[in-house]
Amino acid sequence: MDTPSWNEFKEYSRERIAQIVEENGRPRSVLFEADGSRRVLGFNSEDTLSQEEYWKAATGTLLEILAGFYEHGIRTVFLASFSQKCFTRDRQYVDFMMLKGIRYFCSSDHFLDFFKKHGIRVRFYGNSDFVKEQGYAEILEWMDNLHDTTADYGPNRLYIAFAEGMNEEEVRAAEMGIDFYKTTNRIPTRNDLLQNYYGDIPPMVDMFIHPSEVRDSDCQPLFLGGRAEMYFSTGTMMGFDELTLRTILYDYLFHRIYSSGNRSHEQSSDDAKYLKGFYEENMHRVLGIGKRSPGGEYWLPRFSGRY
């Protein structure tokens, strides 16, 4: 694959980049952590938005992000949205997100038209029993209805993590495997486990993107990890625009996996000299260190990689 310059690549049309992604074979799937919206929308400040205004702003940005993924050739998006720990937030906020936000997401023409336009089949994954225990059983019917409505759409897929908690879900998935064995009298295959947990067979995750934080996600899809390239954008999801996505795709396509599986491990003299100097010069820099915000509430990255 010919390597364009960054200045050339960032000016390509979405269609051209989608073609490059298709020819390369990946990234075809991404796990996106929808994080940081309340930081910049003033949800807890003197500039606090109403819950309706907050929802409208956050979901408007989310749809732009999803459209960007699909139109750049990524076919499957795993959306980390509302983990089990999110249910511990202020009850008024949780009630709004469950009873109004989820209903709007699952049944409004605004979202339904978007899913149809982009050919997106939607599934939720997570612990439905936990949702019932929290008193929100009715939203499960809305989720099922959305799945039925979009079941024949394609070629894109959207898996939404809901009421996920990695430790608890690992145990639940193991119990589902045991139940499968008791019912069928055979050990489940990987596809059996996927079908039981997700309702179909999702692909492995190629990229993991977490805005505004440098950490893993409670909503990592079970059975689908292990090969994802990880990216941590400095801004929140509200600032995750087309240029940010293209920055990630340029690295993924032309730097991260350029020699993946093809490297001979026989260093040229130029590489040997360069690598020695690079690692000696930067041996005390650490990617992922940071500082507290002035009010002490938030962690922010330190780009120098050192204190």
Image: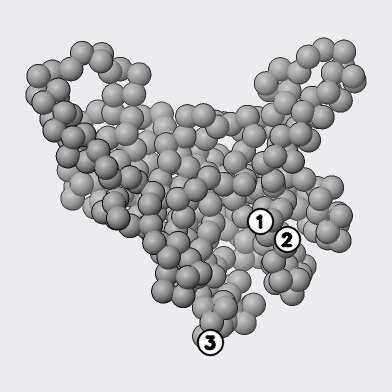
| Residue holding disc 1 | 82
| Residue holding disc 2 | 87
Q: Position of residue 19 (x, y in %)?
A: 35, 37
Q: Are marks 1 and 2 in contact (CB under 8 Å)?
A: yes
What count of labels does the image hold?
A: 3
| Residue holding disc 3 | 46
Q: Residue at x 51, y 29 (%)?
A: 226
Q: Nearer the viewer, residue 294 or 151?
A: 294
SS type, badge 1: strand
In the rendered structure, the answer to whether residue 3 lies left or right of residue 231 reads left
Q: Residue at x 53, y 52 (%)?
A: 33
Q: Amino acid at mark 1?
A: Phe
Q: Position of residue 179 (x, y in %)?
A: 86, 25
Q: Amino acid at mark 2?
A: Phe
Q: Amino acid at mark 3?
A: Glu
Q: Nearer the viewer, residue 113 or 244?
A: 244
